[in-house]
């Protein structure tokens, strides 16, 4: 990147918008600690992706690196691209987080009566499923990393078969999860952070797109061919 702000996105949704009302009510319903609308499967996904970065994402990369027929040089280039792009992504996402300073669901939902939107109802006792991270909400950092990893893996594999993508989460007690496609993996992470009660839908979309853009720099630098 040429600067931390190179991929800084536009601002989060206006608090008077329909997008904000939708995202607020979605995370309020699905991300609360005592949510009755979050399914057991969604709860498992939430707990799994509570795991800190970057080790959980390296498991996904190893699923590709361990595939038959790969060599040391190709894997070294793959890990270099993923690692550099992931570092750039975290720089970019924290630039955006502290530029906008957007409130987390915990703060927003407990103060839903002061956002000027009649479609958001306050719940002063609401708490998220997991502990709220100690930095601003927008955009989603886990999502920018999944966007980086997924986009680089798509470029790396090109027309080759996608191996079973498996990684392990210490946050979930050492449980492993597998996905058959890269798109499934990239889609699951934003959902998980919403189920965790720490991110909004739009923040996941924006974070993922930032990751895809940053990945393309690494794809070019390391001469991977994005499909």
Image (cartoon, rainbow, N blue to C red):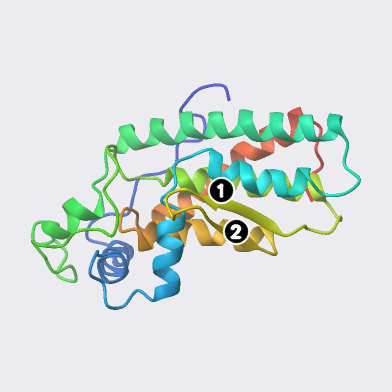
Depth check, front residue: 189 or 147:
189
The dot on residue 185 is 2
Camera-nearest residue between 197 and 39: 39
Residue under the image location 43 percent in, 60 percent down: 192
Residue 32 x/y as whole percent: 25, 65
In this rendering, is residue 147 above or below 94?
below
Return the residue nearer the eye: 40 or 111: 40
Q: Is residue 139 above or below residue 34?
A: above
Q: Position of residue 147 (x, y in %)?
A: 58, 48
Residue that appears at 75% across and 28% down: 221
**Residue 10 picture location, percent across and down:** 41, 44
Quadrant placement of the N terminus: top right
Identify the residue at horizontal 24%, vertical 64% (top origin): 33
Q: Which residue is mark 1?
A: 146
Q: Quadrant of residue 127?
A: bottom left
The image shows residue 35, relative to residue 190, as above or below, that is: below
Q: Quadrant of residue 113?
A: bottom left
> In the depicted view, which residue is nearer to us: 138 or 150?
150
103 left or right of 140 in image: left
């Amino acid at each position: 990147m040429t600067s931390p702000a190179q991929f800084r996105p536009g601002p989060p949704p206006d608090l008077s918008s329909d997008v904000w009302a939708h995202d607020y009510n979605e995370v309020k319903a699905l991300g609360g600690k005592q949510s009755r609308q979050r399914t057991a499967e969604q709860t498992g996904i939430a707990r799994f992706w509570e795991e800190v970065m970057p080790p959980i994402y390296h498991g996904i990369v190893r699923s590709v690196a361990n595939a038959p027929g790969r060599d040391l040089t190709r894997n070294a280039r793959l890990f270099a691209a993923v690692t550099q792009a992931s570092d750039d992504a975290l720089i970019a996402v924290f630039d955006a987080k502290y530029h906008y300073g957007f409130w987390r669901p915990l703060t927003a939902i407990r103060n839903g009566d002061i956002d000027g939107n009649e479609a958001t109802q306050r719940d002063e006792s609401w708490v998220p499923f997991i502990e709220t991270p100690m930095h601003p909400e927008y955009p989603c950092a886990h999502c920018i990393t999944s966007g980086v990893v997924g986009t680089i893996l798509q470029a790396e594999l090109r027309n080759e078969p996608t191996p079973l993508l498996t990684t392990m989460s210490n946050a979930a007690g050492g449980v492993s999860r597998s996905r058959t496609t890269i798109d499934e993996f990239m889609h699951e992470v934003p959902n998980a952070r919403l189920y965790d009660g720490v991110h909004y839908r739009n923040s996941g979309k924006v974070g993922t797109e930032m990751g895809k853009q940053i990945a393309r720099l690494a794809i070019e630098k390391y001469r991977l061919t994005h499909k």
